Image (spheres, helix red, strand yellow):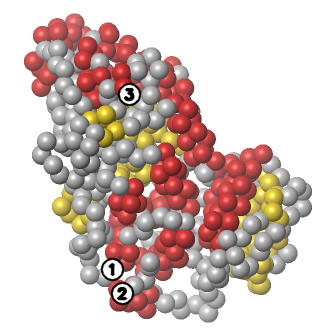
Amino acid sequence: SIGSGIGLGLVLALTAPAAAQTPLNLLPMPQTIVRGSGSITISAGSTVSAQTPQAQAAARLLVDHVRTVRGIALAPAEGDARIIFAQDDAVAGAEAYRLVVQPGGIRITASRAAGFVHGAMTLAQLLSPDTAMGKPVRVPAVTIDDAPRFAWRGLLVDPVRHFQPIAEIKRIVDQMAAVKLNTLHLHLTDDQGWRFEVKRYPKLTEIGAWRQPPSTGGPAPATRHGGFYTQDALRDLVAYAADRGITIVPEIDLPGHAQALVAAYPEIGVLGNRPPVSNEWGVMPYLLNPNPAGMAFIRNVLDELIDVFPGTYIHLGGDEAVKDQWERSPEVQAQMRALNITTENGLQSWVIDEFGKYLATKGRRLIGWDEILEGGLPPSATVMSWRGEKGAVEAVRQDHDVVLSPAPILYLDSMQSRQSTEPPGRWSEIKTLADVYAYDPMPAGIPADKAHHVLGVQMNGWSEYFVTPWQVQHAVFPRIAAIAENGWIQRQRDFPGFVARLVPQMQRWTRAGVEVADSALAVEY
Ligand code: TNX
């Protein structure tokens, strides 16, 4: 249900297009658009052909999308077709594409698989929105040349605080692809659970994946909560995401946020602690023991992780590790002296860097939260800046790459309006669609000659307060569209224009069965 209420009407009235031609409701807005004359009709049986293996997934995606969102069954074909995907190495760039729509046919060209996906998704957005399901749709003649501003346009999904079935994550992946987001950061471990099957250490999921209800009540299931992903299920998810141009960055959060890990294998914690998996929210004190056994344990976990996740980046956390247990452990203190490390923050840097070096031997790169700057930035690290932007500015100064995901502006657990339908959030602030849209992923403190270190931007969907998939989706959609556009476009941002293009995108999301927060469009923020 979209568009009820006065608010939306007002927004639309204020943003009514001046141009005679119907505007193209594309989101994110492509780099260049040249309108042609006439149009082409797509209906049941219209043919689609992928003339290069690189485009096969994108062609399938288009067929699926047009079936589910428009109710039209396209016909896959070989060779000539109404819609052709063809290789063109001149369309350079990992995600670049060219889309040419003429009355005689539609042609999508790219040099890489992700470019074809983006081209297919742009075409999907061009199908006339006003026709009923199953009826032929028109596509206006146009030539679009497009490529993103940033290489990392991400969303963090947290299936730890509340478990989310793979089917729900796939639903989010589908809708990320629809707006050209390309990175799914999967937060797989935390104090409240361990969600990644490790064959060598079965207790991680036998014990670590389950928690008791909280003694204090609160917004959490009243019964034992949990679940985990088998490696097979994750491999399937990785392939599913790859077909949609999306890379998964898995996170194993260390050395803090480790209570579930220590619950499963107390011998790799410190001080002989034997905690249960946490059933409360907050920052817990349990830490990884950085002794040889603890380090070897994590290397073995990483071996299995990189076997499942083929992407370049592996996220090793580093956030909110209170070092009290390290301070109180004679064993850890002795190790620090032996390593000639004087502070616990320095020890954390050493730990993260050891794993970073290990990942490098496997051709992978380490990324961590900005706390990894505190003991000296590990040389191998890329930094994800969440405590504002200062971590990003400092890391870039040291010539490291960064991703911007500052709280609370890009935190989806901030509320998006004062309406009573909002799921509760951790942050008391309200971050509206307009706020998020106004966020510039290039902080003022980053000098122009180092701008290339900013890989991109990400919103984080921490799920302490999101119990159901409905609540997750309500927080994610449509706000994520603001960052999808922000991370993509090189041109000037334009909020009223964005809202006008967002309304049909919200309609497509609704048609695809996704919960979309209408409140994002309410005027009374
Ligand atoms: C801080 S962001 C955390 C998460 C919480 C989040 C809630 C970060 C690196 N750590 O563990 O879920 O706040 O907003």
Q: Residue 367 lies in what quarter of the image? A: top left
Residue hosting label 1? 522
Which class describes the residues within 10 Å of circle 3: few (<14), some (14-19), or many (20+)? Answer: many
Residue 287, x across and y down, in percent: 22, 24
Q: CA distance from mark 1 to mark 2?
A: 8 Å
Q: Amino acid at mark 2?
A: Gly
Q: Earlier in the sequence, mark 1 or mark 3?
A: 3
**Quarter holding the N terminus?**
bottom left
Q: CA distance from mark 1 to mark 3?
A: 43 Å
Query: At 19% from the left edge and 20% from the top edge, which residue is drawn?
Result: 274
Q: Secondary structure at mark 1?
A: loop
Q: Earlier in the sequence, mark 1 or mark 2?
A: 2
Residue hosting label 3? 205
Is disc 1 in contact with disc 2, using a CB cutoff of under 8 Å?
A: yes
Q: Say whether residue 394 is visible.
A: no
Left or right of 249 on screen, residue 122 = right
Q: Say whether residue 464 is visible.
A: yes
Q: Amino acid at mark 1?
A: Ala
Q: Which mark, by number, is residue 5?
A: 2
Eyeballing the image, is 266 above or below 52? above
Residue 406, x across and y down, in percent: 30, 52
Q: Amino acid at mark 3?
A: Thr
Q: Earlier in the sequence, mark 2 or mark 3?
A: 2
Q: Secondary structure at mark 2?
A: loop
Left or right of 499 on screen, residue 388 = left
Residue 165, x across and y down, in percent: 45, 46
